[in-house]
Amino acid sequence: MEALPGISVVQLFMVVKEEISKGYQLVTHPLTGNIGPDRNPYKTIVLTGVPGKVDSRSLEIMEQAIVFANSFSKGQMQRNWDSDTLKDLQLIDLDFIKGYLNKELI
């Protein structure tokens, strides 16, 4: 899967749930870093596997993440960040995924 710019975190979680329903498995948790979906519009989620049997644990995690993300009001999810803040938020997301990749490659 590739980057999906312009969608909300909730929409991303729905897309990932759909992929899990095809048989892909979560490698990284959708709520990495204990940062709520209203705090960062950027979210990297790593999946693995091939289409086939559904991993019930991955599906359960995504369903819980969707419920959690939906618990935030629409007003909280729609923020107007300036470009510097958006760059900082991208860096935070990048740091989380780099940390995971460094851990897995060592």
Image: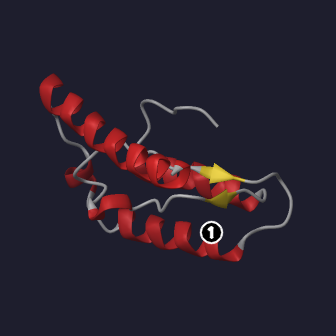
Q: Nearer the viewer, residue 37 or 73?
A: 37
Q: Report the residue that reaches farthest toward the right.
A: 52
Across and down, in percent, residue 73 comes to 26, 60
Q: Report the residue that reaches farthest toward the front.
A: 106
Q: Residue at x 54, y 48 (%)?
A: 105
Across and down, in percent, residue 79 comes to 19, 41
Q: Where's the N terminus, which quadrant? A: top right
Residue 22 lies left or right of residue 73; in this view the side is right
The kind of secondary structure element at disc 1 is helix
Image: 48 above or below 98: below
Image: 50 above or below 57: above
Of the residues shown, which amino acid type is indicated by label 1? Ser
Q: Nearer the viewer, residue 46 or 19?
A: 46
Q: Report the residue that reaches farthest toward the top.
A: 83
Residue under numbered circle 1? 58
Residue 105 lies left or right of residue 78; in this view the side is right
Residue 13 showing in the rendered view: yes
Q: Nearer the viewer, residue 3 or 81?
A: 3
